[in-house]
Amino acid sequence: MSSSVIKLENNSFSKFIPLLIGFMVFLSVLFISVAHIVDEIGSKWTDGINNSMTVQIIPDANLDSEQNDDIISRTITILNQHYGVQDVNLIPNDEVIEMLLPWFGGGLRNVEFPIPRIIDVKLIDDLQIDTVSLKAQLGQISDSIIVDDFSDWRDRVNSIVNTINGLVYTIVLLIIISCMIISVTLTRALMLMNVKTLNMLMLMGAMDSFIAKEFVSYALSVVIKSSLCGFFVALLSINSILYFNNFDFELHFYDWLLIFGVIPVVVILSFLVSIITVKLTLIKRFFNIEF
Amino acid sequence: MTILEKSIIRFHNVKFGYGISNSILNNVNIDIKQGGFYFLTGKSGAGKTSLLKLMYIGNRITDGNLFMFDKDVDSYSRNEIALIRQNISVVFQDYKLLKHLNVFDNLALPLRIKGDSEETIVRKVTQIVKWVGLKQYIDSYPDILSGGQQQRLSIARSVITNPKIILADEPTGSVDEVSAKKIFSLFEQLHKRGTTIIMATHNENLVKSKNYPKLVIENNSVFLEK
């Protein structure tokens, strides 16, 4: 992969560096994948409650059952008439009790307990419903009507997902910065190990661009090879984890683009910092050829 | 002798030293003519290597003016200096061969820097290894060659690009008498072809036996003895 024509020397230190770069790329890919998995989990959680809301009506002990039923039917009417509502479904008492059993135990069927009536409301897709006016209208019927559009839950899930993503991408950024530092170290180490060759090149009249090409192409070939190794090991690891844990996740084109993007980002940045390192070294050594 | 009148390197009031207090060369005013053969003599530590280093622009002068190829070195760009260095070759006492490259690659290096094609490189390297008698060692590494062979390889490397100037720093200092004679005859052949040669040496017998001008370094200054 290297287009070097002067066969640079390396030692055990420069042989250790590819492992380090490979490991860094492995970590980057792993973290980006974690970010996507967290995103996917967040989406799955919020998708189930998107375009729906529930309305709870707590029976008023001071009213008889006919009056309470009247509140329910008026609520259903208002809901059906409200802009953005697609379907309104009053959940039967038995189903509500089934839902509450895990919290209150089996005795719930036998006790006199004001079981709240729950109305499941389906909303038209992607239509913003005016919950403020709806709550105001229902509030005129009774104070005991609670409208829950899950916005708090959604906000909390989004906040957790965003925090995790922020942390993950900060770590990825730090890893990429580490890769750049490693590339600088690799280039400097190469130049130190090949200082005789470097001095000979300058003595023989090699242009800066020639010397830079020799050292940078060598450093870059190391970075590319080790990045690819780290990348494929990471892909293998992620797929194994997902497969053996029966996770059902699908990475989309954009996700793959971001994961694959780690390699060009690492390579391009390494290329730039290597060139700068070589140029700075040459500036210092150009008029100071020492053997 | 074929010393022409045209100046190729000219020192004008040149001073050189490492730091303010460590002056190595003072008020140097010499004129190296194109096509000339010069011995450079002086005691150990007198500044012969430093003077040669200034000639291949391996260090910058502290004060004064250094003219190379009719132009002040300070007025050259970095790329122009690189091109000047391509026209100056240096032969060292300890050869400075790259041990991790074989004979072919050591000889090919200056040609690769110049940007010659691989075909030209193979042709020129094949020619020059015959000239220095190292044809059978073309794939060998410098470590297995004798001192004389390494020095011949070093000379071959320095002339393969047909430089205008060859600076030799004690080129026969590390080889036996027979090898030294062979090496010196190579320099004389190059001189006859019109290459300017400046050879630093301690070998008084050699200097006396040849009728070439001498650059003498004494008390930090340099003067020309004809």
Image: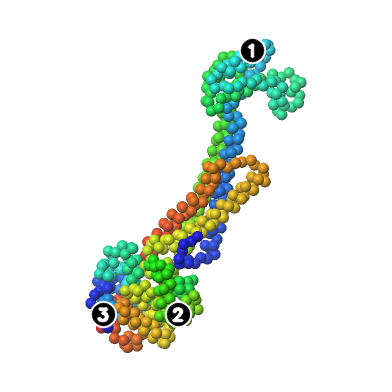
Q: Position of residue B61 (x, y in %)?
A: 30, 68
Q: Quadrant of residue B15?
A: bottom left
Q: Is residue A289 in view?
A: no
Distance CA(mark 3)–CA(mark 1): 123 Å
Q: Quadrant of residue B177?
A: bottom left
In which quadrant will I find the C terminus of chain A?
bottom left
Secondary structure of the residue carrying numbered label 2: loop
Q: Which-is-in-front pick, marks 2 and 1? A: 2
User: Against A277, is B14 above or below?
Assistant: below
Amino acid carrying label 2: it is Leu
Distance CA(mark 2)–CA(mark 1): 112 Å
Residue that numbered label 2 is attached to: B134
Amino acid carrying label 3: it is Ile
Q: Position of residue A217 (x, y in %)?
A: 46, 60
Q: Is residue B35 in view?
A: yes
Q: Which-is-in-front pick, marks 3 and 2? A: 2
User: Against B218, is A269 above or below?
Assistant: above
Q: Residue at 32% of width from left, 72% of height from top? A: B55
| Left or right of A254 in this view: B48 | left
Q: Position of residue B145 (x, y in %)?
A: 48, 79
| Left or right of A190 in this view: A287 | left
Q: Residue at 27% of width from left, 81% of height from top? A: B2
| Left or right of B84 in this view: A137 | right
Both labels 3 and 1 in a single chain: no
CB of mark 3 within 8 Å of CB of mark 1?
A: no
Q: Residue at 57% of width from left, 27% of height from top? A: A51
Q: Which mark is residue B3?
A: 3
